[in-house]
Amino acid sequence: MVVLATSISSAKINPETVQDMHKVTLVSPENGSYTVSPELPKDGMVAAGTELTVEATPADGYSLDVIYYTFKGGMWGTTSVENFTPTMKVTVDKDMSVGATFVENDLVDNINVTQDVVYAQPGVKPLKYDVYSPKGAKDLPLAIIVHGGGWSSNNEDIMRGLARELIKGGKYVVYSIDYRWVGPLDGDKEPNAMHQLIEDVFGAIAHIQEHAAEYGGDPTQIAITGDSAGGHLSASAAILGPMIGDGGFGKANGVYEYMPSYMPKGKTIDAVKNEITEAIKVVAPSYGPFNASDFKQFMPEVKQAYFDAVSPAMHVPNVADRAIPHFIVRGTEDPLIPNEMIQGYVELLKENGQTVEYLQVDGAGHAFFDWKPDAQTRATFAKYGVPYAAEMKSFFDSVLY
């Protein structure tokens, strides 16, 4: 139920933009209700600059997931702006849809959620992660999630559905991390290069390890996963740890070393390298590319050595040197990541004696681990994300328990 309150005449309106009108569409909620004030006219046309207040109330047995508004634009055609508290202020400056989503209490009742922990700010954008910790957690393994989005969109919020699935059973402290986007998309004066995104992932891991005990986690036991671009980045974190160093990335001929964007005080780069490399015990890189030749359009350089340095496929260790069990899924209807792209990496892992489980999900497309407020994305997650998150967690258990 959507409840509309008060009158549009009481709106806060910017007089400079009042002549512009935008269509506001209210999305019918399930398992709860929300109010919008001031009241919208029947045709939904609202003066630009109007400030709407949206308040959400879950039904019995449910909790608020998010209040949101969406508009056309962005990499995937539609962009969502989300708010995790019961009240959200929305300034109308474009055509938009407004709504609220709710989730079952048993998904959130037994966990503590800490949002927006800033671990570094190497550019304009503060880099953050969210923590999902079982109540009473102590010395639990860590499960770290790296979101996808073409290395150029989304943030850690899009993985909250997967986080809630991985924390079921109370066996993991789960982290969902953000990182810089490639190119100038974050507003940085100098475009961000692919290796810097990997450095952000290493920086997040270093910060997470430093503070793991605060959330009941064991910093020496890490499972890491990611989807799409996050599949590449999570595989990079698992495979490329031995390349952490302070020698620079391509500045000297033949030297490609990753400097984490966060370094704990008092620790040497070698200590951080060893702690990260030894802690990552298992990886689940979902429907992502593993060789830079598959995503050269995002690369800032043309040197083959650079391509190789950011390609997990070029650095797969022999199991005798370091075991990195892999769990990989891909939808059979994925239009972006063909089976051949995954299969080549799987064969490399097997050639090196690594344990790998590769599952093709019948009928699934791309990005089925994403969680967004629109009904289609949530339905896709329920159909494919939930059962294959359980498979992933079972694989993690086989390594860490």
Image (tube, rainbow, N blue to C red):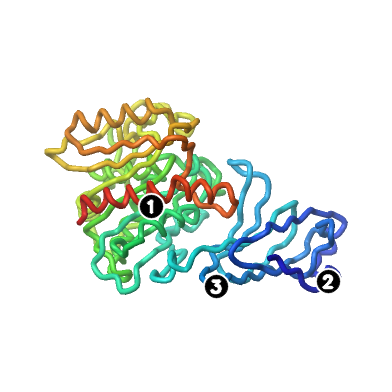
SS at circle 3: loop
Three-letter residue code for mark 3: Asp
Q: Indicate which disc, 1 or 2, sits on the residue closer to the N terminus.
A: 2
Q: Please give the residue where the numbered disc 1 appears in the rendered image.
A: 145
SS at circle 2: loop
How far apart, in angstroms, are the residues tagged by discs 1 and 2?
44 Å
SS at circle 1: strand
Q: Please give the residue where the numbered disc 3 appears in the rendered image.
A: 60
Q: In x, y percent, where is residue 45?
A: 83, 56
Quick one: label 1, few (<14), some, or many (20+) residues within 10 Å?
A: many
Q: Indicate which disc, 3 or 1, sits on the residue closer to the N terminus.
A: 3
How far apart, in angstroms, are the residues tagged by discs 2 and 3?
29 Å
How far apart, in angstroms, are the residues tagged by discs 3 and 1?
31 Å
Quadrant hosting residue 198: top left
Quadrant hosting residue 169: bottom left
Q: Please give the residue where the numbered disc 2 appears in the rendered image.
A: 7
